[in-house]
Structures are given as structure tokens and as C-alpha cells.
Image (cartoon, rainbow, N blue to C red):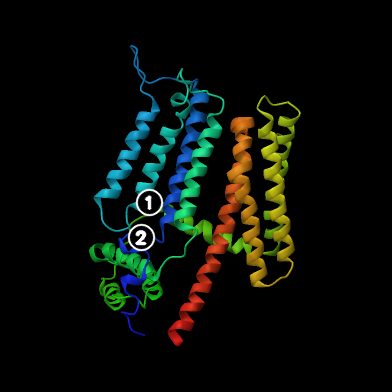
Amino acid sequence: MSRGGTGTAARGRVLRLGVVRDTAAVRHLVTFLVVAVATVLLVRFFLAASGYPQVGGGGLHVAHVLWGGLGMALGIVVLLSFVGPVLRSLGAVLGGIGFGLFVDEIGKFVTADNDYFYEPTAALIYATVVVLVLVVEALHGRRRHHAAEYLAVATDRAVAGVAGGFTDTAREEARSLVALGRDEPGAAEVEALVEAVPRDDVDVPDPVRALVRHVSSWFTAALERRWTAVVVVAAVLGTAAGSLAAGVRVLVHDVDVPPWVGIGIVVGVAATTACVVVGVLLGRGGGADDRRSAAVWVRRGVLVSLLLTQLLVFRALQWVGVAGLVVDLVVLAALGAALGRDDERRRGARGRVSASS
């Protein structure tokens, strides 16, 4: 096949502008969001435990929103100062800490009296995170990567290798990216660059990436066991039952929030339950495609819970809804790891077929 057969004229307008999505972007963005949420929870816990101290004096109060701005600024400086992917995890962590400190004070900026304890604050913070999740999904979850994007990411990895060398693992990852873009113009040159990068046993420490790898491997191994499907379904339905109890409390006026909050919770629980039931029925087929379809449907149910039900639970019970949020996030991460590994297997199989033809 001619390597020039897929010129830039055949690509989308965004890609032709040089706007290339990083294949590791979801990991970095999830790191950013998880660190932000963890920062909010830790700040709230610390302030409650210490009696809400104030930094400052003489009429001055150094709010932690200022430290949040500093954290985000440091993250931006890191991301703009270095080429290659090496420090993106650090930038995501610094940005997440800064954003968490910033968004925790949202109550002060939506109320006339700067009320940090504004009752809907938990729901507002949760809604902010939900919007960011939807943005991530829109950018990275709806369209598959173009072959040129894989090749561009391989080049980006080689940038770091040119300066610091490649470990065996890093070289194999770059090779796999080149293989996915093998029919693009410049693929042979990028492949030669990847092979020319010197070998180095010393890798830049990346605790976030190491943690993601271990968690992903553990989730994937666990989800291959029969009993795990039962645990996942039980966890999702258990969370739905807890949310339903919160909705009923709203509807019987045991919680002082508008009735539509309770109605929304009940609707969300019903939608999640319906998705899980469809997933269970599809999973009874026993085949690999059946199991994948089942996981997709259960994941849809969890997304409904995260994007609708838990938002309203936070509105009704404020920080009490954290337990349901944690369960949903763990299940979503587990299913995402399993589906991601399945996608890798399928891409690998297609690549082997393409290489042999």
C-alpha cells in the first residue's frame, strides 16, 4: 500500500489544523479530576476537624482559593515548559490540587454574603465535575483515534527518548503506536527514529502511571472471574437502592429540598436498574461479545447514576452522597479497564491481520 494514499486532504478539519489527541489524555484528565475531588474532600475534612481556622489577621483572610490559583499556575508552568510526555502526570496532579482548592470555595462566589456553607455547594461542585467528565467524554470517548494521531503520539514519545533514551517497555509502547499508524505518510521515518533512540534502563518515575497500570491489571484480572460480575451488579444495585432511599425521603418531606429532586432521583434509579437488567440478560449468552455488551450496558447504568442520580443525592443530602459516588467511580474504573483491555486485544488482532495481508 502506498504510504501517501492517506494525505492530509482526506482528514478532518481539526486534525489538519494539527490538533492531535494524546492517547494517554484520558489517564491524565482522570488524574486531574480524581485529585481535584480528593482535594475537596480532604479540605472539608481538615477544616471540620480543626474548627475552620482562618489564615490571616488584621482584617485579612487568605482564602484557599488563592492557593488553588497558585497550584493551577504551577501545573500550567510545568506543562508549558517541557516537551514530550514525561511531566504531564505531574502537571495533572498540580492542576488537580489547584482546581480542588479553587472549586471548594464556590459557595462564596455564588452568594451575596460569601457563604462558604451554602447548602447546595456539594451539588454545585459535583455538577462542575460532571460537566468536566462530559467534556472529556466528548473529546476522547466518542471518536476513535485516527491513524495519524497514533503516529503523532509515537513521535511525541520519541521526543522524550531522544533526550533520555528508551526503556524496553517504552520502546515497545512506541512501536505499537507506530504500528497503528503504519499506513500514514512519515510512518517509516518515525519507526526509524523509535529504533534509533538509545536504550536506557533508567525510567522517569511516574507514580500515577504505575498506579493506573497496577489498578488496571488488577481490575482486568478480577473481571475475568465469574463471581466478579455478581459483585459488580450487586454494588451498582446496592448504590441504586441507597439513592432510592434518599429519593423517598425527599418525596415524604423528610429532607427539606424541592420535590423535583426526589422525582429525579427515582427516575435515575429506574434508568440505572433498567440498564443493569439489560446487561444481565445480555451476559447470559456466555460469549465474548455478549460479555462485552453486558459490560457496556452496566457501564451506561453507572454513568446515569454518576451524571444524574448522585448529583441529586448530593443536592438532597450534601456530603452524605460521597459513599455512592465512590462505589460508582470504582465500578466505572473497573469496567473501563476491562473494556479498554478488550479494545487493545481487538486492535492487536486487527493489526496482526493487516500485517499478514
Q: CA distance from mark 2 to mark 1?
A: 25 Å
Q: Position of residue 349 (x, y in %)?
A: 51, 78
Residue 29 seen in render: yes
Q: Counting other residues with Cα less than 10 Å from the Cα at mark 1, is it few (<14), some (14-19), or many (20 or more)? A: many
Q: Is residue 306 above or below residue 214?
A: above
| Residue on which disc 2 sits | 14
Task: Of the two numbered discs 2 and 1 on the same chain, state the one appearing first in sequence.
Answer: 2
Q: Secondary structure at mark 1?
A: helix
Q: Position of residue 278 (x, y in %)?
A: 72, 59
Q: Is residue 313 above or below residue 166?
A: above
- 299 relative position to 159: left or right: right
Q: Is residue 120 above or below residue 308?
A: above
Q: Position of residue 61 (x, y in %)?
A: 36, 19
Q: Counting other residues with Cα less than 10 Å from the Cα at mark 2, is it few (<14), some (14-19), or many (20 or more)? A: few
Q: Amino acid at mark 2?
A: Val
Residue 322 seen in render: no
| Residue on which disc 1 sits | 89
Q: Residue at 47% of width from left, 54% of height from top?
A: 138
Q: Nearer the viewer, mark 2 or mark 1?
A: 2
Q: Position of residue 22 (x, y in %)?
A: 38, 59
Along the line of sight, the residue nearer the viewer: 165 or 339: 339
Q: Residue at 33% of width from left, 43% of height from top?
A: 75
Q: Residue at 32% of width from left, 80% of height from top?
A: 3
Q: Secondary structure at mark 2?
A: helix
